[in-house]
Amino acid sequence: MKEGFRQAMAWLHTWAGLIFGWLLFAIFLTGTLAYFNDEISHWMQPEIPARSVSSEASLTLAQDYLQQHAAGASRWLIELPNAREPGLSVRWQQSPAKRGERGRFTEKLLDPQTGAEVQGRETMGGDFFYRFHFQLQMPYPWGRWLSTIAAMVMFIGLITGIITHKKIFKDFFTFRPRKGQRSWLDGHNAVGVLVLPFHLMITYSSLVIFMAMVMPASILASYKGDASQFYAEVFPASNTPEVAGKPAQLAPLALLLEKAREQWSGGRVGRLTVNNPGDANASVVLARDGSDRVVHDFGSAVTFNGVTGQLLGTTPKQALPVAIAGSFYGLHMGHFAGPVLRWLYFICGLASTAMIGTGLVIWLGKRQLKHAKSGVMPFELRLVEVLNIASMSGLVIAVAAFFWANRLLPVEMAGRAEWEVNSFFMVWGFSLLHAMVRRGRAAWVEQLALAALLFCVVPLLNALSTPYHLGVTLAQGDYALAGFDLACLGSGLFLAWAAWKMQRSAKADTVVRKRAQPITLERGIN
């Protein structure tokens, strides 16, 4: 009975991993890149300088700018810069022409040290990887549903993998290089066990994040089918006072930062919303930044009178269930992580991606061995081979092409952000066609070599197309830009090593086959 149960779990582990493996590889790779989405965005908008300034100074500059350029707006929104995101973002909403209409928003980026407008190139930046990770570039809500189903399959794969491998921890300390399929299986077990807590945490937390979407029955039952009432209770909106129609001077916003910190017993303001600026009923809502704690506090904010600075209200303390959900959200997103912990998240994410990739290689390799003597590969195995190549090495090439497009497309080009994304998918599609034309290891070697070349040349391309090369960024202490170039160079060298190893292995197999062929013929004659 036990052996039958384990065999059933092994079957489920194998086939669930194969069917969703290609999608999971893309989800995990883009999600891993998203841990550095702010740094990627900074590299893709190098015109925005990274400078160390206080929140009070940058907020004063933002207020001065908005009073000059958006004095008649109905609402201001200010995103303060931080160590990871250097830009000072200001937006304002014009008063709607008719009651019930939504006013148009205008957005500008400012230099947080001078308050001058900064024209950053149009790009989605790292936000593209972040959104692709859970939306898959699909219309709402289909991408979220598909990614959540994939996460459930991943969770099932982890549990069945633990059940299937009786000697899982013993296998972790076993690695046999140059043993073909045995080496791939040893690597699969090693990366699976080494960061198993991360695998479980990141997969389960993704299910918790979208729990209300995929399991709404309890919400609908408790609120009699009105889910909006549930969200209004969990995420209460701030009360915006009506316009008084009497002009009044807005208080210095920088003075409200310290008052907000006192309400939170520390913490940092991430965003400010000024309602009715210049009116006697002006109000200022200060939202707390989530980078200083693990538990994500949904909608934590304090509201002040914009003229007198008097405290008008604070969001209520989170209920325990919401705090538990917020802890899973915070652990999954990793906003609280400093540089060292963020790199650890990144490495663990790569390990998860590698675990999925090695599993796909193992599945195909085992079945290819059965047809090695005949030299004829069935259509279904050829299909898996093509999808393996395109979903792994092809995706890596597409990521590099996304970065290349950011530097090669004209800065003034209309819709250049969309064309960066189009370049990503076009190159990914070409990798699929290449995998269909070229067979097996030849396609692997060529695509890995191309990916290595593209990544290694990124620092050179950056130096040729912008003045923000490594010599400048390292001297100025802009380690986000410099680190991106160095990370691309390191990735390119690793991919070059992988292509070389694959090519070397292919040559060794060819020599073995040539040596074995005369012996086979001789035996046939005898």
Image (tube, helix red, strand yellow):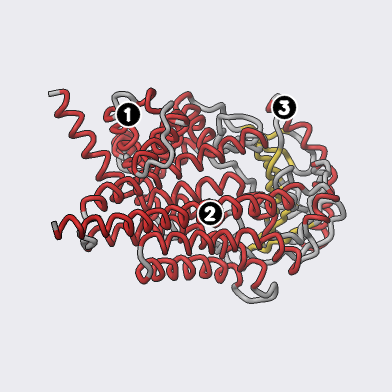
Q: What residue type is labelled 2?
A: Phe
Q: In this view, does 520 lie to the left or right of 499?
A: left
Give the residue number, with chain letter if any, for mark 1: 162
Instruction: Check disc 3 and report its element: helix, strand or loop.
Output: loop
Q: Position of residue 64 (x, y in %)?
A: 84, 54
Question: Which numbered marker is on residue 129?
Answer: 2
Q: Closer to us: mark 2 or mark 3?
A: 2
256 or 248: nearer the eye? 256
Question: Which numbered marker is on residue 192?
Answer: none
Dot 2 and dot 3 residues touching (CB under 8 Å): no
Direction right: furthest residue = 114
Instruction: Check disc 2 and report its element: helix, strand or loop.
Output: helix
Total numbered labels? 3
Give the residue number, with chain letter if any, for mark 3: 266
Q: Which amino acid does label 3 sit on?
A: Gly
**How packed is label 2: few (under 14 Cα within 10 Å), some, or many (20 or more)?**
many
Residue plotted at (65% across, 54% down)? 489
Residue plotted at (55% across, 42% down)? 237
**Of the image marks 2 and 3, the number of the one nearer the N terminus:** 2
